[in-house]
Image (cartoon, rainbow, N blue to C red):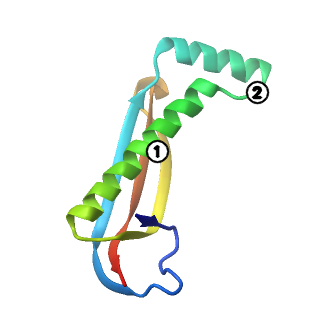
Amino acid sequence: MLKTTTHTVEGRPIQEYLGVVVGEAILGANIFKDLFGSITDIIGGRSGSYEREMGRARKIAFAEIEAQTRALGGNAIVGIDLDYEVVGEKGGMMMVSVSGTAVKLR
């Protein structure tokens, strides 16, 4: 399925706008990941555990908007917006939210 942050697709006119689609994924970060992330932040570098979790959340959110688009009869999603948030008590959870417009392209 074609997905883009732009509102048009060059050479592919939009036949029909089907509606807004939204996918969200909230993943908890356990104590071991928190501890590892803190150590990585102190010594510098990247936290692979957090990056993997964020990637997993992003895949879940995108899968949700693709499924919604298919259910509406669409073949593309335009105007995609991707947001990341830290939620929960003491920022113990990560949320990825993806939204866009389901469309039918020619």
Identify residue type, mark 2. Answer: Gly
Q: Residue 87's spot in the image, x, y percent?
A: 43, 34
Q: Residue 10's spot in the image, x, y percent?
A: 53, 84
Residue at (44, 67) in percent of width and height:
2
Q: How many marks?
A: 2
Quadrant that contains the C terminus = bottom left
Question: Is residue 7 depicted above or below 83 in this figure?
Answer: below
Report helix, strand or loop for mark 1. Answer: helix
Question: Is residue 41 depicted above or below 62 in this figure?
Answer: above
Identify residue type, mark 1. Answer: Arg
Quadrant that contains the N terminus = bottom left
Pointers 1 and 2 in contact (C-beta within 8 Å): no
Report helix, strand or loop for mark 2. Answer: loop
Residue at (28, 55) in percent of width and height:
67
Q: Which residue ends up furthest to the right in the rendered image?
A: 43
Q: Residue 27's spot in the image, x, y percent?
A: 40, 31
In the rendered structure, the answer to whether residue 105 lies left or right of residue 54 reads left
Which badge, 1 or 2, comes first in the chain's sequence? 2
> Which mark is on residue 45?
2
Residue at (26, 59) in percent of width and height:
68
Give residue 18's quadrant in the image: bottom left
User: How far separated are the C-alphas under marks 1 and 2?
Assistant: 22 Å
The residue that disc 1 covers is: 58
Give residue 28's quadrant in the image: top left
Q: Residue 105's spot in the image, x, y percent?
A: 37, 80
Question: Is residue 54 depicted above or below 82 in this figure?
Answer: above
